[in-house]
Amino acid sequence: MNANTPDRSTAAAFPRYLTGEVVADSVALQWPGLYARRWRLPRVVDRFLVPATPEPHISCNLRGMAEFRERDVGGAWVTRQIHGGDLFVTRSRTPYEVRFQSPPGQELDNLSLHIAVEPFMAALEARYPGKADRVEVVDFFGRDEILWPICLTCAELLAARVPGKSPRVAALTQLFAAHLVEKYTKTTAKTAAVRGGLPIHQLRKVEDYVTAHLAQEISIEELAALVELSSSHFAHVFKESTGMTPLQFVTRQRVTRAQQLIRETSRSLIDVGLEVGYTSPSHFAQVFRRVVGVTPTEFRSSL
């Protein structure tokens, strides 16, 4: 289990803490309200910690099977047999531990989905006017004959590399949000509290600023000023929220954007590096290789 996994994270940082290979990621396609990742999971995973996120999470097993165990940290293990078509729905406010083992040749092919806070809250407000802050998601495991084909549609759009500006992505996001709100929520007596880290709206403010200024120098001081905190306090609570330092987050966003540009354009690697803030081609190549595992040139040639 990764000892560096935080108790809470965000959908943007979520893949950093899971095990397995991401074979498709909607972040590279700039889907605005939905984080969709397709995972190829190893056959045996001894144990890893899944951080809580403010965004509701759907885990959809597309194919494969496994004996799957989960528990609250320090609690008793709950064992489930997972097959293709099984789904998990959660908006856990605390981290939980997972372990699983698949038969040879039956490794899990998983679609992991997070609905961004804004469309989810809009769906909550439409369903529970004036009471959205007193609604919680009910954890679910099993089969959902309505949600399953929506997940398959999402996987197809992801495989087809449909860009975030497509109306189909917005419609899919609204459909996910509406279904979760109608089937997997309930009202509670108290307003749900979120402890530790930055509030999600402040995290989103920082993320939007970084995305808009990738070509420029971005300092911790600038980011801290956005949320009216001192640089040292901001750095602490940002890492508590995401598991990354602010500068690690900036680097990840730059490399993610660079991957998108390399995939979708024929622009020179020098131009790509300049657009994401690297004036030195050698420095760009060094950072890209550290994050992705290959150089920009090798990445382009593999496409």
Image (spheres, rainbow, N blue to C red):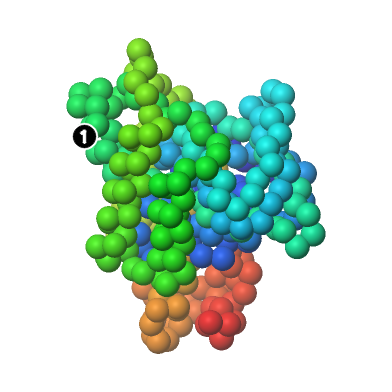
Residue 111 percent across, percent down from the top left:
53, 55
Viewed as shown, does residue 175 lie left or right of 13?
Answer: left
Q: Is residue 110 above or below residue 55?
A: below
- Tell me the amino acid under the disc marked 1: Ala
Where does the image place residue 288, in percent across and percent down from the top left? 55, 70
Q: Would residue 294 be seen by someone viewing this image from the given angle? A: yes
Front in this rendered view, residue 214 or 79: 79
- The residue located at (69%, 52%) in the rendering is 65
Local crowd size for mark 1, using a 10 Å CA cut-off: few (<14), some (14–19), many (≥20): some
The spot of residue 174 in percent (x, y) is 29, 48
Would you say residue 216 is visible in this rendering?
no
Q: Is residue 73 left or right of residue 94?
A: right
Residue lying at the far top of the rendered structure: 189
Residue occupied by mark 1? 126
Foreground: 107 or 236?
107
For the N terminus, the image quarter is top right
Closest to the observer: 222 or 111? 111
> Which residue appears at 55% of the width and 39% of the height?
142
Question: Where on the picture, by quarter, is residue 28?
Answer: bottom left
Task: Determine whether 256 is above or below 199 in the image.
Answer: below
Quadrant in the picture for residue 165: bottom left
- Furthest toward the front, the residue is 145
Against 277, residue 1 (above or below) is above
Which residue is rendered at x = 66% and y = 56% of the image?
A: 64
